[in-house]
Amino acid sequence: MIKINNLHANIEGKEILKGLTLEVKPGEIHAIMGPNGAGKSTLASILAGREEYEVTEGSVDFDGLDLLEMDTEDRARAGLFLAFQYPVEIPGVSNINFLRTAMNEIREHKGMDPISAKEFMAMVKEKSALVELDPKLASRSVNEGFSGGEKKRNEIFQMAMLEPKLAILDETDSGLDIDALRIVANGVNTLKSDKNATIVITHYKRLLDYIIPDFVHVLYDGRIVKSGTKELAIELEEKGYDWIKAELV
Amino acid sequence: MSYTEHELAKDLENQEYKFGFVSNIESDQIPKGLNEDVIRIISAKKEEPQWMLDFRLNAFRVWSEMTEPDWAHVHYQKPNFQDIVYYSAPKQTKKYESWDDVDPEMKETMKKLGISMEEQKRLTGVAVDFVMDSVSVATSFKSKLKELGIIFCSFSEAVQEYPELVQKYMGTVVPTSDNFYAALNSAVFTDGSFCYIPKGVRCPMELSTYFRINEGGTGQFERTLVVADEGSYVSYLEGCTAPMRDENQLHAAVVELVSLDNAEIKYSTVQNWYPGDKNGKGGIFNFVTKRGICETNAKISWTQVETGSAVTWKYPSCILKGDHSIGEFYSVAVTNNYQQADTGTKMIHLGRNTKSTIISKGISAGKSSNSYRGLVQIHKGAHNARNFSQCDSLLMTDECGAHTFPYIECKNSSAKIEHEATTSKIGEDQIFYCKQRGISEEKAIGLIVNGYCKEVLNQLPMEFAVEAQKLLTISLEGSVG
Ligand SMILES: Nc1ncnc2c1ncn2[C@@H]1O[C@H](COP(=O)(O)OP(=O)(O)OP(=O)(O)O)[C@@H](O)[C@H]1O
Ligand SMILES: [Mg+2]
């Protein structure tokens, strides 16, 4: 699905990613953990196509496409989805209008006709129920005045609507109450198939109790320094990152 | 990444002003220049009654004494008033009796402009008066409106057919001496629209005037007068375009609205005069005086979407004379490249319990300058007057400018006046968020800007709102930087 090879990236002259390598196959769920400032969101942003970052070395293959050569919107149309750590508000633009525009752009890209209003609304109904998103939120302006938890749920709702191949969830669990956490996890698990994959960025093992990852990686100082299974998350929770740091020297 | 900024810039240069074509229609023009004789010629060509000529001559004398104002936050080469053709009319000056009589080239022009005049296209439910180079060319749905006693015709026709109405109201809201351009217009205006809604009648369709400048070297000076008699209602739309030319052309219009007791007038404008090229060459100077007066319990609502013109100078205003009258102003003004706009409103509260609302959304891109200038005036007798103003500015680049000049004059302590203003830069984060969902940059800007203007766009009649949204998106294509 995605093959990240020896990725180096700078922002404002400062190297953040220092040779990151990671492969995710269809049907897999990978968790990335790591201390604050390690470069997790940076990785997500670069994969999504944020232009502030300068990639100095390495390559990313996404389903046979040279991801780094693609525009942000083309990456999205090819099936890459990022659930933002801090979802953005767009006043005056309804969630529905936003999603319908997105969906139709993606469809157009695939040579499909625009979705009919009826079909679209049926889908909104189904998917908002899946993440237990208050239907009223669907017609409100994108994220405007949403609570922190509602914003995160809205990200998962959008993911459910757009049905991406690869979803990257950047700390979608932070700020969620325990019920919301379960709901979001349930959403991710329901959408899981052998054709798509998910990268979950999180600080807490808690989320991984609900979304069972196939692999857990530790991102530290711009590199994946340790990989394992769910057991690794448990170990991290017990010992903290100092343990990894100690191991590295 | 594959699409560089350079390519984008190239694409945009090629993004032509869609209405920039010139129609090859023979015109009847008089020589350049302005003096009493020219005014007499205009009046004679239009076979006007003496009172109309007198009105013009008086205006000309008033104008000759005045100097061009320069308080607005705009910079431009002042027009040479002797270098303008004051009368230009498409050759066949007689009004068409039926659609079939319309000259094919003219029909083609209207088609290109997207104006449907054919009566069978009733579906759109809009009656149109088409004014080209200061002459009304055709008016649709006239007979149907007549059944309800509604008069909707060209200004010239009104002067001939309804002199008592014209004489009673013309110049009562915008007096000749009001300002330099209003005086000029009063002297030389060649046509425009006239509309009268009788007592208690709710006009069943949108009335619309489409203004088009076609000839070069001409100025367009039209006059619109809308009178809503007691308890009536009308929604009026106005659209404007002009060909692309290197010269600056002057458009100095006067619009007067009279809303009598319990009447309501909704006046919407989508102004898309040619804005000049990307280097600021050419474009229309749009110096317009628009004002309405509200009697008791009456309402006037101005909605404008201003995307065109090289220089705009325009303050649609309301005189809230009657008790409980209401004035509203909803505006979106977009400037790009070297465009300059100084626009806003005046709300003059005279009556008791009068209420006004001002919502202004300025969007600046390129190297443009966009100013809001507003005056809220509460007179002594205006007990319990209320005003709410909100002026927001959105910047698309670091090189453009946005300015807000809100003036408040309050002579009655019971008044409640609220003013809010914000300035923000279009969010890179918002654009990125949209793009990450598969939405192209252009569409993203369109979405964000339309969202930003929503309160104003919501005021427009449906068909117009769709047009306005497209226009906003086109006007701002690739303008983020
Ligand atoms: N625009 C920027 N300018 C300068 N430094 C930046 C910028 N964006 C990120 N950084 C730096 O890059 C480093 C990695 O940040 P990043 O957001 O990727 O961390 P993270 O692993 O997601 O952390 P957290 O767990 O706190 O979310 C940090 O030191 C951060 O300060
Ligand atoms: Mg982060």
Image: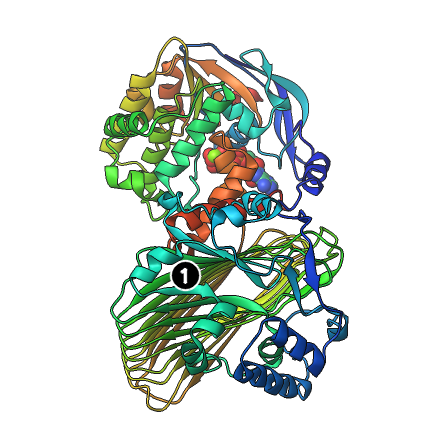
Ligand 1 contact, mark 1 (Cβ < 8 Å): no
x, y percent for residue B306: 54, 58
x, y percent for residue B14: 70, 39
Tell me which corner region of the image, top left, top right, bottom left or bottom right, holds residue B354. Answer: bottom left
Residue at 59 percent of width and 61 percent of height: B93
x, y percent for residue B80: 76, 73
Relative placement, left or right, of A7 versus B279 is: left
The amino acid beneath tag 1 is Tyr
Dot 1: element:
strand
Relative placement, left or right, of B4 versus A132 is: right
Relative placement, left or right, of B29 versus A40 is: right
Q: Chain of mark 1?
A: B
Residue A126 seen in this snapshot: yes
Residue at 62 percent of width and 34 percent of height: A53
* Residue placed most toward the observer, B237 or B192: B192
Where B64 sits versus A147, above or below?
A: below
- Color scheme of the displayed model: rainbow
Find disc 1 in the rendering and name its residue.
Answer: B236
